[in-house]
């Protein structure tokens, strides 16, 4: 399909060009200001004659989605205005019925929780594969997925591709194992819209055979924040169920700034993406070599388990145990460089075609000043998995009460609890709080690390009512 057109963008421009007197919403009537009147306000439209209907598209949105599907290799593509979150929830709700099981890693993004709760879906958790020198999950072992599939009760498998630090698991093998059993594979490709633009990037999930894939077009595809896409291929995830789920999850007032930016991002990727990413990869691979010579330790392919691969455009830099947040502050305050993410022992810097050679050189120079990282061994060992006594739905929708950590043992978690970063829950809702988990959380607090799901005063939300205690 011809990729130079951008039907939705053209429709928005045409509407603005007609200079109509606006007696319709949004109430700013085209004057919304982001620090000065201009095209942004005029283009902040929603569904109007000629601009189609996101929930039942037959015109320009349908044409823009079809053009995107052709480019990404999908049978059907849906534009998302509530980030990857809406797409992740829709594909899970479409593939897994209430009470059925979904195989997914414990380090899945918390966006999955909305689907587990709305759908009454039961998780079958997978542990992550890791590396002794890095504190974050690198991915899932295909063998662990095969073993979970052998239980014979899962309706779908959910795979992050890649994890935040740019590492992908052996998705083709996971897809093969799942499809042998007629099980659908749902992929969170939030950080991988650009995969497939160069042979040096990981294999895109659709090419690996995934049935449903959510891409954060706003993350690495050039769209405005919140703009994302959900792609379907084949019949394992029924399009009709996806459409119904998206009807539940997406706003009825979609922003045409977001929608048009998805159309333009696809056109840009299709017409210029290969050239731009080839140039970026040449530059970034050179930068990786240079940083290595200067003694900076970067996550590299040599760190990965068999079958895993790395997006070289994402730079994960070791800074030493516990030094991540301070190193990120130093880069910002002393070098004017803001990285994407500071883990306890590493930083993540995201590169993109918009970076100039001067930007990349400044990054390299600044990283080199952080000094060679002495990798620490101080990471706390993760506690064992607690028993799931309620489904996530039962736990999240039940009355809950906040109790001091010390009194939480034996109670049932009402919210996910995670050390952030990296944000992998040690407790998912519905799991019984163990003494081991509480001891771990006390140690985390003593180290001053940030905990999600435990308030500043050290209280944890557990299922129950105040009267019940
Ligand atoms: C791996 C992963 N999946 C899903 C999401 C959710 O994406 P969004 O913020 O577009 O809803 C994120 C957000 O950072 C993410 O990192």
Image (tube, rainbow, N blue to C red):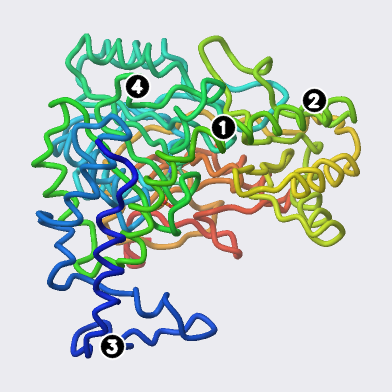
* Nearest-to-viewer mark from 1 and 2: 2
Label 1: state its secondary structure.
Answer: loop
The disc at residue 207 is: 4
Q: Residue 20 vs residue 359: left or right? A: left
- Asked if the beta carbon under badge 4 is closer than 8 A to the nearest atom of ligand 1, the reply is no
The residue that disc 3 covers is 27
Q: Residue 145 vs residue 349: left or right? A: left
Residue at position x 50%, y 33% from top?
274
The disc at residue 166 is: 1
Q: How far apart are marks 1 and 4 (CA)?
A: 18 Å
Residue 397, quarter of picture: bottom left
Comes first in the chain, label 3 or label 4: 3
Q: Residues within 10 Å of mark 2 (few under 14, many from 20)?
A: few
The residue that disc 2 covers is 289
- Asked if the beta carbon under badge 1 is closer than 8 A to the nearest atom of ligand 1, the reply is no
Residue 7: % across, % down = 25, 55
Residue 135: % across, % down = 66, 32
Comes first in the chain, label 1 or label 4: 1
Residue at position x 32%, y 33% from top?
72
- Asked if the beta carbon under badge 2 is closer than 8 A to the nearest atom of ligand 1, the reply is no
- Whether label 2 touches label 3, CB < 8 Å: no
Residue 103: % across, % down = 31, 26
Q: Residue 456 vs residue 102: left or right? A: right
Q: Residue 99 vs residue 261: left or right? A: left
Comes first in the chain, label 1 or label 2: 1
Q: Distance between the residues labelled 3 and 4?
A: 44 Å
Please identify the quadrant where the N terminus is shown.
Answer: top left
Residue 132, quarter of picture: top right
Comes first in the chain, label 4 or label 2: 4
């Amino acid at each position: 399909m011809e990729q130079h057109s951008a039907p939705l963008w053209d429709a928005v421009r045409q509407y603005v060009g007609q200079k109509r007197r606006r007696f319709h919403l949004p109430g700013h009537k085209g004057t919304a200001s982001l620090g000065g009147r201009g095209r942004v306000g005029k283009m902040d439209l929603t569904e109007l004659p000629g601009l189609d209907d996101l929930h039942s598209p037959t015109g320009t949105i349908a044409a823009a989605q079809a053009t995107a599907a052709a480019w990404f290799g999908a049978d059907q593509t849906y534009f998302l205005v509530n980030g990857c979150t809406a797409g992740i929830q829709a594909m899970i709700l479409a593939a897994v019925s209430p009470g059925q099981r979904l195989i997914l890693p414990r380090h899945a993004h918390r966006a999955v929780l909305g689907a587990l709760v709305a759908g009454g879906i039961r998780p079958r958790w997978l542990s992550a594969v890791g590396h002794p020198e890095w504190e974050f999950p690198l991915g899932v072992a295909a063998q662990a997925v095969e073993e979970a599939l052998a239980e014979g009760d899962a309706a779908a498998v959910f795979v992050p591709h890649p994890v935040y630090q740019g590492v992908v698991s052996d998705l083709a093998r996971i897809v093969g194992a799942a499809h042998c059993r007629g099980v659908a594979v749902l992929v969170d490709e939030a950080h991988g819209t650009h995969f497939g633009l160069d042979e040096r990037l990981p294999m895109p999930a659709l090419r690996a055979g995934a049935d449903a894939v959510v891409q954060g077009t706003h993350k690495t595809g050039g769209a405005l924040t919140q703009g994302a896409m959900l792609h379907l291929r084949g019949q394992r995830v029924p399009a009709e169920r996806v459409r119904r789920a998206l009807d539940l999850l997406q706003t009825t007032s979609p922003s045409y700034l977001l929608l048009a930016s998805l159309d333009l991002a696809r056109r840009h990727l299709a017409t210029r993406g290969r050239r731009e990413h080839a140039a970026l990869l040449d530059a970034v691979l050179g930068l990786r070599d240079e940083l290595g010579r200067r003694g900076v330790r970067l996550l590299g392919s040599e760190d990965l388990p068999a079958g895993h691969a790395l997006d070289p455009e994402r730079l994960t830099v070791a800074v030493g145990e516990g030094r991540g947040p301070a190193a990120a502050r130093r880069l910002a305050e002393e070098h004017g460089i803001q990285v994407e993410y500071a883990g306890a022992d590493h930083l993540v810097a995201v590169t993109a075609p918009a970076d100039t050679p001067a930007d990349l050189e400044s990054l390299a120079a600044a990283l080199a000043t952080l000094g060679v990282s002495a990798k620490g061994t101080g990471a706390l060992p993760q506690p064992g998995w607690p028993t799931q006594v309620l489904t996530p739905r039962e736990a999240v929708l039940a009355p809950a009460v906040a109790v001091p950590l010390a009194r939480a043992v034996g109670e049932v978690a009402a919210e996910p609890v995670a050390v952030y970063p990296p944000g992998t829950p040690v407790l998912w809702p519905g799991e019984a709080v163990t003494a081991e988990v509480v001891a771990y959380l006390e140690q985390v607090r003593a180290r001053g690390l940030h905990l999600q799901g435990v308030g500043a005063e050290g209280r944890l939300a557990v299922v129950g009512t105040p009267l019940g205690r």
